[in-house]
Image (cartoon, rainbow, N blue to C red):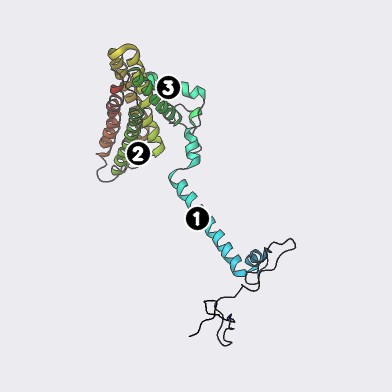
Amino acid sequence: MDLPHGGYRATKPRARAPPPSGDPLLFEDTSSSGQPLGPQGYYSSEYNMGGMTSGGGVNNLFTDPMASAAVMYGSSLASQGKDMVNKEITRFMSVNKLKYFFAVDTKYVMKKLLLLMFPYTHQDWEVRYHRDSPLTPRHDVNAPDLYIPTMAFITYILLAGMALGIQKRFSPEVLGLCASTALVWVVIEVLVMLLGLYLLTVHSDLSTFDLVAYSGYKYVGMIFTVLCGLLFGSDGYFVALAWSSCALMFFIVRSLRMKILSSLSSDSMGAGAAAKPRMRLYITVATAAFQPLIIYWLTSHLVR
């Protein structure tokens, strides 16, 4: 084959063949026809998505009857779920009932603290009622409350931290263990009380909040015990432990007796009715006798 004198084969520019008319295009050829330019030489940002203009999709969504029905159905389901959640929360923890236990004032707090430390001179232990509902704690010193147990628990934790700091034994882990242990003991005590009342079929107006309040009053005696131990040493600690334990036991027996033993008149009939007063007295005394053990267990390691 003869080559041209330039040393390479001359080639003809190949013309691009159009695609067959019968086959559809898989991709549109945009190499020859470019996107139209704007007035300042930039590409125009307007585009067409399936024939929708700007804002057309949102308008179509709200004008579509199926979409509107779906939105209304979802809203009704959400409202029904909210009502069910509120109903379940109210079932286990009523906000109005919880407010009752915090309806206190300064006069009530002072009288209640004196009653907890000196209960021997108190005569009337019956909770007063008005139209079948108990009076609030600010109007009746015998009514249980949750304000004093809550404040006493926080004060006990702060006092425990101070006692551990004085003894060079403070650490966040030890303080957290002290707080969790004190809280767990109250929970265990309340659960045991509820189980005992259930097994003995005691029909009384004692609620879970009442049991938490009576169980939480021990923190007042614990604060008094730890303070005496820090100020007067081990001798002051044991004297304060004996005083606060006896006062708390007397308070628990007199308070729970009005709640538990007074319900004998309503269900004293039936088989085994003669053993019920004895069993209810036992559970009341056992609850009171358990308080000194918990006080000693939660305060002995704070005083050395």
Q: Quadrant of residue 245?
A: top left
Residue highlighted by disc 1: 81
Q: Is residue 205 visible?
A: no
Q: Earlier in the sequence, mark 2 or mark 3?
A: 3
Judged from this view, the residue extending furthest toward the front is: 5
Q: Is residue 179 above or below residue 234?
A: below
Marks 2, 3: nearer the viewer? 3
As helix, strand or loop, the secondary structure at mark 2 comes to helix
Q: Residue at x 27, y 41 (%)?
A: 273
Q: Residue at x 35, y 17 (%)?
A: 166
Marks 2, 1: nearer the viewer? 1
Residue highlighted by disc 3: 113
Q: Is residue 184 visible?
A: yes
Q: Earlier in the sequence, mark 2 or mark 1?
A: 1
Residue kind at label 1, given as amino acid type: Gly
Residue 71 location, x and y as percent?
58, 62
* CA distance for labels 2 and 1: 43 Å
Residue highlighted by disc 2: 265
Residue 249 location, x and y as percent?
32, 25
